[in-house]
Image (cartoon, grey):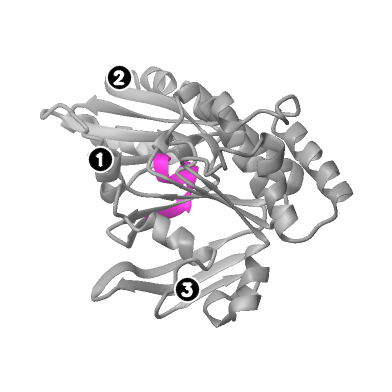
Amino acid sequence: MISIENLHKYYGDIKVLNDISIDIKKGEIFAIVGHSGAGKSTLLRCINGLEEYGDGSLKVNDKEIKTLNKNELREFRKNIGMIFQHFSLIQRKTVYENVALPLELWGYDKDYIDIKVNELLALVGLDNKLDSYPKELSGGQKQRVAIARALTLDPDVLLSDEATSALDPNTTTSILNLLKEINEKLNITIVLVTHEMEVVKQIAQKALLLEHGNIIGFDDTEELFLKPDEKMKHFLGENEVVPHDGVNIKLYFPKDNAYQSFITKMARELNMDFNIVWGKLEEINTHIVGNMVINIKEEEKVVVTNYIKEHDIIWEVL
């Protein structure tokens, strides 16, 4: 669907994207994550042809973006929907008129426009707001209008550039649930740019982590959060505070065994007591995953680690 290979992007002499290679499958919800200045929005604009890129390849539906001429690029962008942080609605136009605008610009007839706009406003839950103006809407409602407008031309891909950053947590959840619903109903590929890790956890199936234009993480979302490497821990701002005495073992529990009473079972069968330093469960894209740190005596290390290996638990000594 979207294939990026060895992509480089410069602003003058400054490299802002360095050797980016990813594949995004049809119907996938994919997150591009990073702090301010990481290059995530630049990458998104390369995908829809708003930014040129240097070396490397970027194909959407097997079309190399940098080889498209002006007319081909215009036709290509018809298949790319876009939603933004600040909605980009036209204040003097009604909800209906804002959603209808792309269809009018492409010359669709009035009857088709009327059917399509009403259909999309029903999909986003705003069929009772056709004649309202943006100033009369809440932030969440404005974003729903923007989503409806982005879907008018039946795009294959929906790009979201920090679309929930201006919204409160409850509204953010409702918008993300709407995007999930759209993804499932329309099988549309969604690419999200965000700096909010909760957004990634809630909706993304895969995630790319960028830092200063470099990839520091790329995997299924559950894998990134289940067992983060040092770069990921630094990105998340996680500091593991553990005892200095004894051996600290971190255990990882994926979605299939997050609720298993492994520690209790191990303590009973080995006839040992463990100091549980800390642990957590969290929801990642509707699945529950978790991890836990236990502290044991040095002389117990071999017995405990052998037991863990026998039960196929992911683990590491901190």
Q: Which residue is mark 3?
A: 5
In this rendering, the label closer to the viewer, 1 or 3: 3
Asked if one can make out residue 286 in the rendered structure from this viewpoint, the answer is no
Give the residues drawn in magenta, as a range: 217-226
Q: Residue furthest left?
A: 244
- In the picture, the quarter occupied by the N terminus is bottom right
Quarter of the figure with residue 92:
top right
Name which residue type carries label 3: Glu
Q: Residue at x 80, y 38 (%)?
A: 119
> In the image, residue 181 lies at what x, y percent?
69, 36
Quarter of the figure with residue 128:
top right
Is residue 104 shown above or below 49?
Answer: above
Q: Which residue is mark 2?
A: 272
**What's the distance in space between the residues labelled 3 and 2, CA to CA?**
51 Å
> In the image, residue 210 lies at what x, y percent?
35, 55
Q: Which residue is mark 1?
A: 317
